[in-house]
Amino acid sequence: MQSYVRLMDAVSRWCGNLASWALLAACLISAGNATLRYTFNIGSNAWLEVQWYLFGMAVFAGAPMLLKLNEHVRVDVVYGGLHPRTKAWIDLLGILFVLLPLCLTVAWMAWPFVAEAYAQGETSPSAGGLIRWPIKLAIPLGFGLMALQGLAELFKRVGYLRGTSNLDLHYERPLQ
């Protein structure tokens, strides 16, 4: 279990770095597009689509890293004040009965969506638009990576509850 956890944590870290670079590229392209459009009246649908492709990639690639860092979105009504073992149980059950089934179902159901776009050579209806299958592929890959990191998080909780590993369950509730 520990070697799998280390591997998945490394993969999620790499994907998180990829997400950071994708967001930076999207911001630079956005600034460049705006500058060209308002300064020289030049625009390109392809560059606009590259922006949202990069943003979509960042969301799907960055989500497993957020799960690894325990910074994912949660409904925190009482979680923050609970005992660490109780938090570990809540996390374990949530991963097992919500996160993993949801991720695996979406990843599985998205494959035909990707395959159809690829087989048909689907492109954007916008003039100069891009092919669509690469961004559609981000859906099953992103949810698959989330499931794999979820499994690593499940193993971490099991190890913590067995007393064989330490786990930082600190969760700081965002300011409202």
Image (cartoon, rainbow, N blue to C red):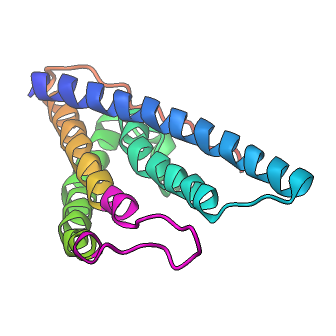
- Seen from the viewer's position, the closer of residues 47 and 81 is 47
- Seen from the viewer's position, the closer of residues 130 and 78 is 130
Q: Which residues are magenta?
A: 117-139
Judged left or right of residue 65, residue 28 is: right
Whether residue 62 appears in this view of the structure is yes
Answer above or below: position of 121 versus 37: below
> Residue 38 at what x, y percent from top left?
89, 56
> Residue 124 at what x, y percent from top left?
49, 73
Whether residue 78 appears in this view of the structure is no
- Seen from the viewer's position, the closer of residues 25 and 18 is 25
Based on the displayed image, in which of its 4 quarters is residue 152 positioned? top left
Q: Does 132 appear in magenta?
A: yes
> Residue 35 at what x, y percent from top left?
84, 48
Q: Which residue is drawn at the image coordinates 19% and 26% (left, top)?
A: 7
Answer above or below: position of 10 versus 176: above
Q: Which residue is drawn at the image coordinates 52% and 56% (left, top)?
A: 77
Q: Which residue is drawn at the image coordinates 28% and 57% (left, top)?
A: 99
Q: Quadrant of the N terminus?
A: top left
Judged left or right of residue 47, residue 16 is: left
Answer above or below: position of 32 versus 38: above
